[in-house]
Amino acid sequence: MSRWTGSLGGDTGGFCCEQDGYGGRPCSHLREFALAVAAQERIESTRRLSRLGFTGLVEAADEGDPAALEALEVLLDGPEDDWAGSAPPTSADPLADDPRFYPLPEDGEGHPTGTGAIDCATDDAVGTRAASARTTASDSADTVIEIDIDIDIDDTDTCDVGGSWSRVLDRPLTEVFAQVEAESGRNLGISLTALGQAKAGPVLAALLAGVDQDQIDRFATLEILAGYKRIEAWAAAAAARTASTLADKATTFHHPSLPEKIDATGEEIALRLAISKTEARDLVTVGHGLTRAFTQTGAALAAGAIDFRKAA
């Protein structure tokens, strides 16, 4: 840093300027420099997290990496009212804290019992149960789901569910879905439920960009697509806010032959983005609305909960 000589005489080396030397606080130059350094550090951190991917991010967080811990906190931090009226989760996987997904107790024959199991009355005098048949289903990524189905000679073990007939499953559907999510999320290093609830923003964008989609199954790929759509909504919210800010900084033009001054913000946006003037002006209008009267809608769009078409 260059040395500065104060107006009162004497060498005051180490200070940036007179404001820094006599103001008792860092001057505007130092504050701008600190902001630039912090921004560059955030860029480098985002690039590093992008190279790590989801699995590497979780591993780095387990090792106590501050940047990885902060990224996970931002990634998993949903809207403030997500857990209104209930205790916050104690695990990174929301399924682990949801009573609906707790393992069910089993009877002596290894069948789950309790409120989560499906139970139907059968007539003991009609038929005898055959041996339990095990059905195995495999998806394109070799994710195996095993379901025990008790087969009767007739339909005495079927129950009416919402007007349709269904075989009794020894395992509740929630347990099956949990297994699918666990198997699919294992490829990413984070559960699909956590990914589906991840907050839209630069951290999520960097992590999604680092996913090798050829190495994940269809369930995980679908959540990756949903994540990108949330990023699209987040970017649309940022673009609308920026258009509103640009309009607030507009330079108006006046000519004696015109009844009022002209705001050329719409024309400037249209020329720069190669869109119509109507579309550009609509973008400014939506930006004004999201930042003034409809702030909750703007927050929902920024979080990826709705798309730009719904917000507009």
Image (cartoon, helix red, strand yellow):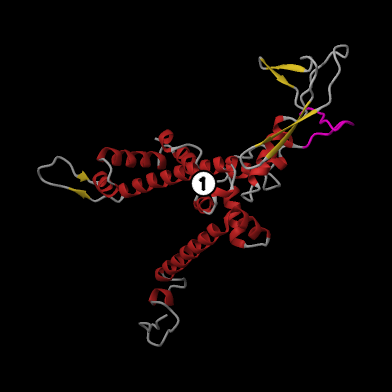
Question: Mark 1: few, some, or many residues within 10 Å (few <14, many ≥20)?
Answer: many
Which of 238/111 is in front?
111
Q: Quick check: 59 above or below 32?
A: above
Residue beneath the point at 57% across and 55% down: 53
Q: Taking the image as drawn, is residue 80 in sight?
A: no
Pick whichever, 289 or 146, lies toward us.
Answer: 146
Expressed as whole percent of the image width and height from the top left, the position of residue 265 reads: 26, 46
Q: Determine the secondary structure under disc 1.
A: loop
Q: Magenta stretch: residue 262 in it?
A: no
Asked if the magenta segment contains residue 114, the reply would be yes
- Type of amino acid under label 1: Ala
- In depth, the one of 230 and 296 nearer the eye is 230
Q: Position of residue 253 (x, y in %)?
A: 18, 48
Residue beneath label 1, please?
Answer: 200
Q: Is residue 34 left or right of residue 89?
A: left
**Magenta part of the chain:** 103-116
Q: Relative to residue 210, is residue 98 drawn left or right?
A: right
Residue 248: horizontal and vertical position, in percent? 31, 48
The quadrant the N terminus occupies is: bottom left
Q: Quadrant of residue 293?
A: top left
Q: Residue 200 vs residue 15: left or right?
A: right
Q: In front here: 16 or 99?
A: 99
- Quarter of the picture containing the C terminus is top left
Query: Is any part of residue 290 visible from this angle?
Result: yes
Give the main secondary structure, helix, strand or loop, of the magenta stretch.
loop
Looking at the rendering, which quadrant does residue 114 occupy?
Answer: top right
Image height of 137 relative to 74, above or below: above
Residue 169 at x, y percent in the picture:
75, 26
Tally of marks: 1
Determine the residue located farthest toward the bottom in the rendered image. Answer: 10
Residue drawn at the location 66% of the way across and 62% of the way down: 64
